[in-house]
Amino acid sequence: MKCEEAQELITALIDHELIGPEQVSIEEHIEGCSSCRFIHSRQLALKSAVHKAGAGLKAPAALKERILHDPRVFRPKPAVFEPLRTSRLYLRPALAVALLILLVLPLLYMMRPAAKPLSLNALEVHEKIIGGELSFIRGGSPEAIKEALYRSVAGAFAPMTYDLTALKLKAVGGTVREFDGRKVLVTIYEGDGLTVTCYTFLGTETDAPPAAERFYDAVKKINFYTYARGGINAVMHREGNLICILVSPLPAPQLLSLARSNA
Amino acid sequence: MTHLDHLYRVAVHLAKEPDQAHDLVQETYARALGSYEQFVAGTHLKAWLTKILHNLFFDRYREAKRWVSVEEDKAGKDEEGDYWQRIPAENPGPESNVLRGELSDKISDAIKKLPEEFRTLIVLVDMEDFSYAEAAEILSCPLGTVRSRLSRGRELLHRYLKDYVGTKEKV
């Protein structure tokens, strides 16, 4: 091996980048060549000196600071506290509003107009049916009307049926109304120029208007509540969890008698 | 900050001006974070950062190619300087530290005088202990080029430092 050829191999030998025949070859050459042995020693010393020179070189603090403040490197933390600051800004007004609502709402609730008893709606419905303002499904036998109404509330309860043949009245149709989320089955009886409407819904005796007159049937042990508006009379009573109301322009005693006889 | 000192050492020897070196390091971190999805977990982070830094240097400050023929000047075998060996390796006193500091500056200055092709490899392999394969990957050059440039670079560097670094062995 010529010395010129050995130069690069000496470099690689120093860097431990030689293996196998190349390493053996250059080691043998160095052993027998004082010039290349000197170059080898010189490169070793140089490499060691360069390494030591670098070891003492540290990044200056100013550079660290510069990088630390580079938003591309260290992105500012998401402003998680920003919404809090904003909310703090509005915290007092928000609390004041909440307090006001808490105080005012119960007052408004107490001052609200008394809810109209469901039973009074029966009078309005009756007036609308008489006045033709409210349509209802006509036709079919009383049984068919009852069945249709029963299905309309998914079998939850059935409409009360009355035998009004003495007054020459028969069921001619029915409809379903809803008041405050409560469904009311309405059966319309007609005959001889008279219309009687019958209302059935789930409820209690508290559904009776406060001004209604109560009549207690000692035999049947049932309370009957009578009330009227604009010449229209109504009689309400309870059978189990069902409330039944008869509405008609018939005189109140006659209507009460009719209700009692069918109860 | 991972590998900051290492990146600084490479940058300070590649760039001519300290400000350029600072810019290179700062930009390297910014670029690395911007393209972190390209880094393959489990691979050599230090080499990856160094490659980014070198590419930045190449794009921004790379000087014109200056090939230096070291074969033309064979002078230097007759070394007078034995500076490194004169400094005690163990238990150095205050005076030795001063001398070491002076020598480090001389070496640093000498490296900066090398053409870029040699300078980069001297820094990567001799100062930062990269293997030839890693250096080849960083510089995107063949393995054989690394070896030949290193050999020539060391020869030239020795010429610059012949008064300061040598060996007791004489021809």
Image: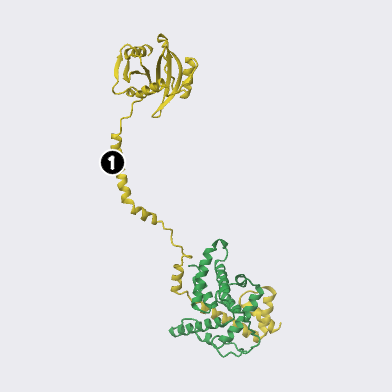
Chain colours: A yellow, B green
Residue farthest to the top, as pictured: A166
Q: Secondary structure at mark 1?
A: helix
To which quarter of the image does residue A106 belong? top left
Question: Which residue in the protein does label 1 denote?
Answer: A103
| Coordinates of residue A112 in the picture (x, y in percent) | 30, 34
Residue farthest to the right, as pictured: A1
Q: In front: B119, or A144?
A: A144
To which quarter of the image does residue A166 belong? top left
Give the quarter of the figure containing the C terminus of chain B: bottom right
Q: In front: B168, or B132?
A: B132
Number of dots carrying numbers? 1
Q: In front: A164, or A83?
A: A164
Q: Name the amino acid, label 1.
A: Leu
Q: Chain of mark 1?
A: A
| Coordinates of residue A228 in the picture (x, y in percent) | 32, 19
Q: Is residue A243 above or below residue A112?
A: above
Q: Residue at x 70, y 75 (%)?
A: A21
